[in-house]
Amino acid sequence: MAPVKVSCKWGKEVFSDIEVDTTQSPLIFKSQLFTLSGVPPERQKVMIKGALLKDDEWGKAVPKDGVTIMMMGTADPISVEAPKNAPVFVEDLPEDEQDTLGTKAYGSGLANLGNTCYMNSTVQCLYSVGALQQALAKYSPPPGAAAGADGRLVAATKELFADLKKGGAAFPPFKFLMTLRERFPQFAQTGNSGDYMQQDAEECYSQIMYTLREKLKEEDGSSVVDQLFGLKLVTKLKSEESGEEINESGTAYTLKCNIAGDTNYLHQ
């Protein structure tokens, strides 16, 4: 028997041109109605020519082509969930988040805690070295007092780098600053007004660098800092009178460029 086309009236809605194959179970037809209306088959009351349609047989409710049938029943509530990975547009973010959106690529800024720009610039300089970040992430300080002041400073550096990596608003490095001043008390000097004094960024860089050098070691005992920042220098001293020459070699961690009147054209 060829399929027939019927219409179904459900409340105020009418579904037209529904193809029905009466050689199949009525439950198949009810499944079609469920797709259209959302009313599960077990809650459907389908009337054809005054006869109630069953699930397993057509009986007296065999539809004819073009007939309109009646259905009653309550549809399942539609669950509308926001997509888990919904796109977030920049203009929809709060202003403070918009301002710091790009910081994850470079790390957060550091808040000035009172003449601490010398320290902040040093930390930001070191943070830009990805290999140093990786070495610090692997560092595990000894527990408690066994770490010593050097170990605590390296651990504080590790923790600070992890905070910077999160991005976001400028981060106040209180713990790192306190640990730095514990290890190197000269950075805790105050002026006549009681405010902390400005310090030399090069000195801060050198002190942190040498501390990291002693604590960050490879498996073979070599220093990570030597590999990343070490400059092998050979100094030659020659006497103009005797011609005697003295060669000295060593490792430096800064390359100084003294700017004077005859070298002020140097840019880097």
Image (cartoon, rainbow, N blue to C red):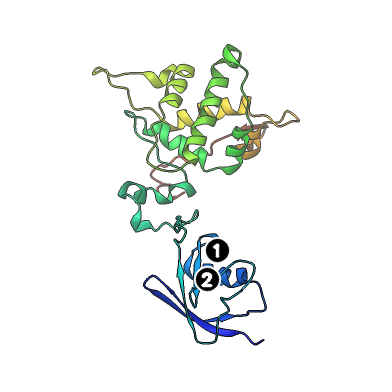
Q: Earlier in the sequence, mark 2 or mark 1?
A: 2
Residue 154 occupies quadrant: top right
Q: Residue at x 39, y 74 (%)?
A: 13
Figure check: 66 above or below 152: below
Residue 109 sits above or below residue 6 on the image: above
Q: Residues within 10 Å of mark 1 (few under 14, many from 20)?
A: some
Which image quadrant is residue 168 in?
top left
Question: According to the image, label 2 marks what residue?
Answer: 33
**Residue at left offset 64%, top offset 71%:** 57
Amino acid tagged 2: Leu
- Left/right placement of residue 54 relative to residue 75 reads right
| Residue 153 x, y percent position in the rendering | 52, 23
Tell me residue 251's x, y (percent). Answer: 63, 33
114 to the left or right of 118: left
As drawn, the residue found furthest toward the left would be: 193
Q: Residue at x 56, y 76 (%)?
A: 61
Residue 229 as seen in the image, left or right of residue 173 = right
Label 2 sits on a secondary structure element that is helix
Q: Nearer the viewer, residue 12 or 264?
A: 12
| Residue 101: x %, y % from top left | 40, 50
| Residue at numbered disc 1 | 41
Q: Are marks 2 and 1 in contact (CB under 8 Å)?
A: yes
Along the line of sight, which residue is nearer the eye, 161 or 211?
Answer: 161
Point out which mark residue 183 bears.
Answer: none
Q: Residue at x 49, y 78 (%)?
A: 49
Identity, as a three-letter code, of the amino acid under mark 1: Pro
* Number of numbered callouts drawn: 2
Whether residue 167 appears in this view of the structure is yes
Disc 2 residue crowd, few under 14, some 14–19, many 20+, Cα 10 Å:
many
